C-alpha cells in the first residue's frame, strides 16, 4: 500500500517529490571563475558562505538545474556578494574568465 504512494520529503526547506528522488542522484559540476545565466531564476536568492553551500542548495531543489556563487570581492556588485543565484534552463555560460564567481550545472546519474 505505502510502496505505491509518492511521499513528499522536506529537506533543508526544499520539497522533493519521491518520484524525482527515485530517478537518481543529483550531482553538480564545480567550475571556478565561471558564471551561468538561466531562462528562469529561482528567487529569492539565498546568501551562502561558500560556493559548496550554494551547490548543495541547488542539488536539494529539484527545480534547480544550475547555480552561480558570487565571492565576497570588490569586483562583484555589493548586492550580489556571497549570494547564490539558482536557476532552471541553462541560457549561457562563461567559463574561466568570470573571476570571483563559481558555477555548476546539475545532472542526474
Image: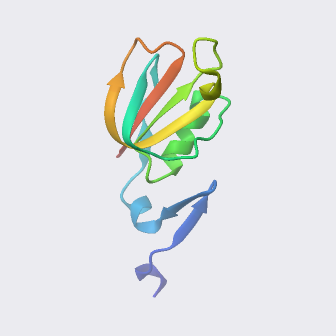
Q: Is residue 10 above or below residue 38?
A: below
Q: Quadrant of residue 74?
A: top right
109 displayed left or right of 30: left
- Residue 11, above or below 109: below
Indicate whether 55 appears above or below 34. Answer: below
User: In the rendered view, does 70 fall on the left or right side of 90?
Assistant: right
Residue 81 image offset from top left, x and y in percent:
63, 24
Residue drawn where x is 42% and y is 50% of the image: 25
Q: How is the image coloured?
A: rainbow
In screen coordinates, is 71 left or right of 101? right
- Residue 71 lies, in percent from the top left, at 60, 21
In the rendered image, residue 87, in percent from the top left (x then y), is placed at: 44, 42
* Residue at the right extreme of this rendering: 49
Can you tell which quarter of the image residue 100 is in?
top right
Is 11 left or right of 42, judged from the image as shown? right
Q: Quadrant of the N terminus?
A: bottom left
Residue at 34% across, 26% down: 93
In depth, the one of 99 and 3 nearer the eye is 99
Can you give x and y, in whole percent of width and height, for residue 72 in the image?
Answer: 65, 19
**Residue sitting nearer the eye, 93 or 14:** 93
Q: How many marks?
A: 0
Q: Which is more toward the observer, 69 or 8?
A: 69
Amino acid at each position: 500500500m505505502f510502496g505505491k504512494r509518492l511521499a513528499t520529503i522536506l529537506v533543508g526547506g526544499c520539497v522533493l517529490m519521491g518520484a524525482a528522488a527515485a530517478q537518481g542522484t543529483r550531482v553538480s559540476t564545480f567550475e571556478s571563475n565561471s558564471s551561468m545565466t538561466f531562462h528562469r531564476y529561482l528567487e529569492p536568492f539565498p546568501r551562502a558562505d561558500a560556493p559548496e553551500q550554494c551547490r548543495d542548495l541547488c542539488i536539494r531543489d529539484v527545480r534547480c538545474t544550475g547555480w552561480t556563487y558570487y565571492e565576497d570581492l570588490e569586483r562583484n556588485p555589493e548586492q550580489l556578494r556571497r549570494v547564490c543565484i539558482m536557476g532552471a534552463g541553462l541560457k549561457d555560460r562563461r567559463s574561466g574568465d568570470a573571476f570571483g564567481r563559481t558555477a555548476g550545472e546539475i545532472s542526474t546519474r
